[in-house]
Amino acid sequence: MTIQLLSPILINQIAAGEVVDRPASIVKELVENAIDAGATEISIQLEHGGRDVISVSDNGCGIQGTELHLAVAPHATSKIMEEADLAAVASLGFRGEALASIGSVSHLAITSRTKEDDAGMRIEVDAGEASEPAPTAARVGTTVEVKRLFYNTPARRKFLKSDSAETTRVRDAVQKIAAAHPLVSFVLKSGDRTLLRYGQSDTKDRLISIFGPELTSELIDVSYELGEMKLWGVIGTPDVARPTSRNIRVHVNGRTIQDPSITHALKDAYKGLIEPNRWPTAALFIEMNPALVDVNVHPQKSEVRFRDKNAIWRLVNRGVATALQANDIVATFWPSDSSTSSSFGTGEQLPMIEGVSTEWMHQETPLPTIRKSDEVMQVHKCFLVTQDEQGILIIDQHALHERIMFEELYERMQQTQLESQRLLVPDSIEADGAKMELLEEHQVLFQKLGIEVEASGPASISVYALPTLLVSRSVEGSKFIQDVFDLLSDAQGEVDEETVLVDILDMMACKAAIKAGDEMTQTELKDLLSKRHLYERSSRCPHGRPTTMRLSIEELEKKFGRR
Ligand code: ADP
Ligand code: MG
């Protein structure tokens, strides 16, 4: 084997594999370029999910005709000049590889005009070969057209999903950027359909138009400082918590990022306020010294590395907790002591009861048998306390009920469809194009779930019937449907229907289950405990939250100095 230098086109195609893997990532790069150019109006046009045409136009500063060939050259950027700049990147782009990468896997054309120029200039790139720029009529700003994406890399083209799946991803990508840039107006069109249209706005209103009108008057301002770091933005009340984390947006110095630790800090601040399997709505903006965050750790720039991760965690956690408290939103029922609740569900660390290590009951351990004669006590309207042959059992009433309901629902679904009940008054939600598509696509699933939903106008969906179980527990139809749509859109094209179904049943079980704070009669208590075997057989643990904890006699004896 001989070692050879790769040709420039091949180098770019390899880079393209990381930076631009599908239409959504191309749109992200092009829109970020427009924002870096100071654009206040950006419009995006797709044909066939972006595989035939992606066109992004902006009214930004434009590119000088003499520099057009540099814009499409690899490792060419106007955003940083030397290493020191890399430590303080203020722009969204800086790697200088997006346009070169895109040009190596498509027919790329850029038309641009700066305000000093009388006319525009246009350059075309075909499989990495750039043409001489030529004059053309153009407005001030830039239009980038990407045609026949991946025509020369068939392997990559094969990885593209259906047109509608790719379009959905583009819509998600645009919504992500739009949430972070309310001062910029956006239009996204696919063929002759307008999928998104956001006028110039502020953070709150932009979020409401992205996440839905149900957020109106459910958003709380966040503003907090820790040392030289600042956190601002808006968070949703516990009422608008969602079954997925898609309504969480995190930005660091204007850059939208994914960061599990920040999401955790946010969720932790809601501990006791929302169910552990639900996620808050939030758009958080962190402003910090750029030297303390490395933005150059991910080809698509969607992850960063913080110098002091713990400080960021505290900033977010305290900032959000303070905002919730300021609005009198405080936990009442769920354990709020961080030493116990941090081990909730993680299974890493056994919780302690005053220094006694206790044991969570997991699926593998056989369930302790509770004799009929054993008394059951409800403590703080939240936990059930009883005994088995080995010691004291403490049961989370909601967690147990939820588990049992899930099993019952799942079994019913396997056999037939869920029993459904008509609502006296139909419930309606506002719906965008994305919801309308989901509605059409999942009719069979809705029917199986006992949900009767139909479009009741160009932008509204009405719920006429719901599973009896939910009606009997007075679950609000509009909220439930909203959650179902969330789960469906989160799953789009990614997971099989069975997984979504389990998620939906899980969410139904959670909504219908007895809550912490609900008083229970002795009969209800015993009835609940007698059904524990239902989930013992099951391997489908909806979300690994423990339902039962045992304090063994042995441990008690040790604690009291009997051993
Ligand atoms: P980067 O954004 O990392 O600099 P790109 O390949 O995305 O790399 O873009 C290369 C250069 O082309 C940018 O640095 C910028 O100077 C110019 N450019 C790209 N898109 C635009 C645009 N929409 N408006 C103005 N200039 C642009
Ligand atoms: Mg760029």
Image: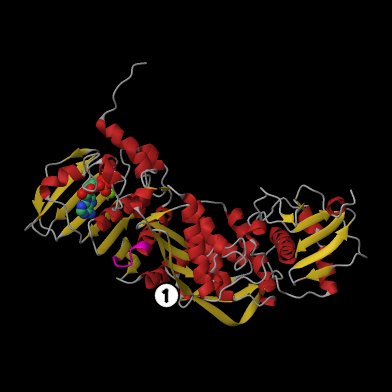
Q: Answer with the quarter of the image where residue 16 lies.
A: top left
Q: SS for tag 1?
A: loop
Which residue is at the front of the view, 294 or 24?
294
**Residue range corresponding to the magenta coloring:** 180-185
- In the rendered image, residue 552, in percent from the top left (x then y), is placed at 84, 53
Looking at the image, residue 289 sits to the left or right of residue 140; the answer is: right
Evaluate whether residue 492 shows in this view.
no
Note whether 344 is above or below 376 in the view shown. above
Evaluate whether residue 265 shows in this view.
yes
Which residue is situated farthest in the bottom direction here?
424
- Residue 181 inside the magenta-drawn segment: yes
Which residue is situated farthest in the left direction here?
118
Residue at image position (54%, 72%) is 325
Determine if the C-beta at disc 1 is less than 8 A from ligand 1: no
Residue at image position (20%, 61%) is 59
Q: Answer with the quarter of the image where residue 174 lies.
A: bottom left
Which residue is situated farthest in the right direction here?
373
Note whether 520 is above or below 306 in the view shown. below
The residue that label 1 is drawn on is 458
The amino acid type of the residue labelled 1 equals Pro
Q: Say how the picture is coloured.
A: secondary structure
- Residue 7 inside the magenta-drawn segment: no
- In the rendered image, residue 329, in percent from the top left (x then y), is placed at 56, 74
Note whether 265 is above or below 427 in the view shown. above
Q: Answer with the quarter of the image where residue 382 lies.
A: bottom right
- In the rendered image, residue 132, in percent from the top left (x then y), is placed at 11, 42
